[in-house]
């Protein structure tokens, strides 16, 4: 389907590998890499947004 849509073969292989189910299990990679338990992404995003770090005026240098 992706190849028929004109995506490059590298992209087709990448998406096939990511979406074929082999990455569906939970692992301890975050704990091993960072030395702490993972955080829920929505919690991280909400807390980061509250700091104003992603405010468009800040990004524009104003």
Image: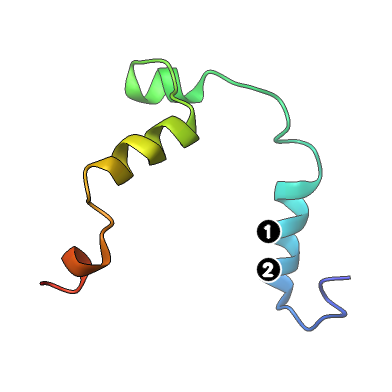
Q: Is 11 on the left-hand or right-hand side of 41?
A: right
Q: How many marks on residues?
A: 2
- Residue at point 70%, 78% (across, down): 8
- Residue at point 42%, 18% (across, down): 31
- Residue at point 43%, 24% (across, down): 39
- Do the numbered discs 2 and 1 sit on residues whose CB atoms are within 8 Å? yes
Asked which secondary structure carries label 2, the reply is helix
Whole-angstrom CA distance, mark 2 to mark 1, is 5 Å
* Quadrant of res 58: bottom left
- Residue at point 42%, 19% (across, down): 32
Other-residue count near label 2 (Cα within 10 Å), few / some / many at <14 / 14–19 / ≥20: few
- In the rendered image of this protein, does residue 61 appear above or below residue 48? below
Q: Is 22 on the left-hand or right-hand side of 35?
A: right
The x and y percentages for residue 23 are 70, 35
**Which residue is at the front of the view, 56 or 13?**
56
Q: Mark 2 points at which residue?
A: 11
- In the rendered image of this protein, does residue 33 appear above or below residue 20? above
Identify the disc placed on residue 14: 1
Other-residue count near label 1 (Cα within 10 Å), few / some / many at <14 / 14–19 / ≥20: few
- In the rendered image of this protein, does residue 41 appear above or below residue 35? below
Asked which secondary structure carries label 1, the reply is helix
């Amino acid at each position: 389907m992706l190849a028929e849509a004109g995506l490059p073969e590298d992209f087709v292989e990448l998406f096939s590998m990511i979406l074929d189910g082999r990455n569906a299990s939970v692992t301890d990679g975050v704990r091993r890499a960072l030395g702490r338990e993972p955080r829920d992404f929505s919690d991280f995003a909400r807390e980061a947004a509250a700091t104003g770090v992603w405010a468009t005026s800040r990004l524009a240098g104003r």
